[in-house]
Image (cartoon, coloured by chain):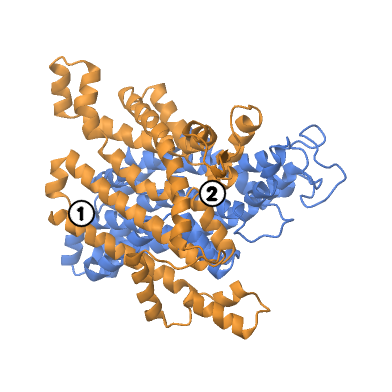
Amino acid sequence: MAEETTPTGVTDSAAVLDIDEEGVVDGATRRQVQREQFKLLLKSPGFLIGFSIFMFWVVASFFPGWFTTVDPKEFTPQLDIPPGSDAWFGTDKLGRDVFSRVIFGARPIMIVAPLAAGLAVIAGTLLGLAAGYYRGWFDEIVSRIAEALLSTPAILLAILIVVTFGSTDPVIIGTVAVLFTPPVYRTVRAAALSESRLDYVTSAKMRGESSLFIIAREILPNVIGVTVVEFTVRLGYAIFTVATLAFLGIKAGNATDADWGIDVSATWERIVSGSWWPTIFPALAIASLVIAVNLIADSIEEALSS
Amino acid sequence: MAFFVRRLLLSLITLAIILTMITLIPFVAPGDPARKIAGGTASPERLAQVTESLGLDASPPVQLGRAFKSVFTLDFGEAFTKPGESVVGLVSAALWKSGKLVLFALAVVLPLSILGGTIAAYKKDTWIDRLIVNVGLALSSIPEFVGGVVLLWLLGVKFEFFKISANAPQVRDGAELVDPGIITQLHHLLLPVLVVLFVYFGYIARVTRAGVINALDSDYARTAFMKGLPTGTVFRKHILRNALQPTVAVVATQLGYMLGGMVGLEIVFNYPGLGRMVVDAAQTSDYPLLRGAVVVVALIYMVATLFADLIIAWMNPRARLGGEG
């Protein structure tokens, strides 16, 4: 998918800041604004649809047994039967139940992608706050490195790094986290930068507050909306990237465990000979998950800027 | 001019950083890349030979020096898995293939997405606006390989018309094999281009929509409408020129991704572009090829964004004067 560099991202965060400006310093007003925004979010159809789909996959990844009693790894003599009453989504060429594999396949990606996105948001927020507040050489250096990482498609760098360090889950989580830190950093830095110029920061400085206090207690609460949006957006990209790595055969995983990306990669060449179900169902599962996360991200962004 | 120089300088710094990272990765990685390539049972002589040909016998600073030199001389050595073939040759062949796909894709995607975004802006907050924005958003969040296999199944298998391989087979011309005519090639590229349309329609339409809404709101647009100019003229002469600046910027920043990042797409449609070359190189530990390809993609990105800035400066003199680079 299209990778960041949205000019709109800048205007959006500016819109978020407008609201915060009204609620400057006054924590009670800010909380009230946040409550209003939350109510608005719960009324948005996009959010409700996205959240329902997302929660379905969360539940499936924790309790796959609630949805199916069939073992996703079990070979049966029913090879390659099309979807029907015996097997809702059919069976693959080894006789394994596709529905069960789709349900069980949620877990690997639901562990790796949120961890990667979470780490990226934490790192990007800390660096962004520091750079936006202190500016100077620290800002210069981190910004140049971030720009360099953004100048090459994340997927290419991911392939390069994962292949060098070995395709294990920790390496994939770390790689995706590192590659997604720059966009988070850039957004948070821009927000922190414009917050630092506001009166409440100046007055905190004059009160003699420490820099750490100002960053953590004054600026951070005002950029938290931006980081929430960033987390959901990054989560979408993380699912995208991890699934793609799995499809390319670069993500580790033994061939028998259910994994959407690996399953698509193992079966797609047989679409041409008519056996579409072992590929299309896990592919649609990936699609439903990324669309759900993007709907959530989009609704949060809209609620925050209204 | 100062703007341009500053911009160029920043690009060079960026390139230097990316080059440094790519060159130093083998040093921080566990395991010996030479051993990976030579194989676990290779003799010490063979290992030494591989180490030397990879340039890994030199110290990090020396290697870094070589890496920088390789960019200026455009010589990345020989591919490891294809002895005798230069990395530059292989990368340019793949780039040519990817370039064809991207050009054709842009020719289809740009007009449709700009039109979609303009309609959405003009019909702001109606059902048609929501449809364009939401469907576009949903489609553009799907990974290319997912869109690829779904279209392969929906269109490629059922309708003879769509070709399932993006790479048109070569035809015999006298004694040698040559690429078939342009129409045949485009015909084969149709399915992947549809996937690219999925990926970018929502994205470009959204940016265009935001730009057009901004422009429609401006005084000059209002004046133009009040002068009684026809809607089409106002859009062509006044609105799009200003509204499309963010669109130009976005397309430029996406060029590197389009050329080198659509790996899944190239694999599904069996297309020998840059993305697939990178995956193959990665899986065979062909570091010279891998580095060459990544550097080329980064270079393209930089040149494209540089050009985008220039085009925007040309479209909007204000950016030229007050731009922060």
Picture colour for chain A? blue
Picture colour for chain B? orange
Residue A4 versus residue A180 in the image, above or below:
above
- Where disc 2 sits, the SS reads loop
Looking at numbered disc 1 in the image, what kind of residue is underneath it? Gly
Q: Residue at x 48, y 51 (%)?
A: B94
Which corner quadrant of the image does residue A89 belong to? top right
Reading the image, the residue beneath label 2 is B272
> Which one is earlier in the sequence, the residue at label 2 or at label 1?
2
Image quarter hosting the C terminus of chain A: top left
Considering depth in this image, is A167 or A274 the residue closer to the camera? Answer: A274
Residue B30, image x and y in percent?
Answer: 55, 76
Which corner quadrant of the image does residue B72 belong to? bottom left
Q: In this view, which residue lies farthest toward the right?
A: A77
Which corner quadrant of the image does residue B114 belong to? top left
Q: Can residue A39 be seen in this view?
A: no
Task: Provide the chain ID for the residue under circle 2.
Answer: B
Q: Which residue is drawn at 20% across and 22% down?
A: B234
Badge 2 local density, few (<14 within 10 Å), some, or many (20+)? some
Looking at numbered disc 2 in the image, what kind of residue is underneath it? Pro
Distance of label 2 from label 1 (alpha carbons): 36 Å
Task: Provide the chain ID for the residue under circle 1.
Answer: B
- Where disc 1 sits, the SS reads loop
Reading the image, the residue beneath label 1 is B325
Residue A214, image x and y in percent?
Answer: 26, 64
Considering depth in this image, is B38 or A149 the residue closer to the camera? Answer: B38
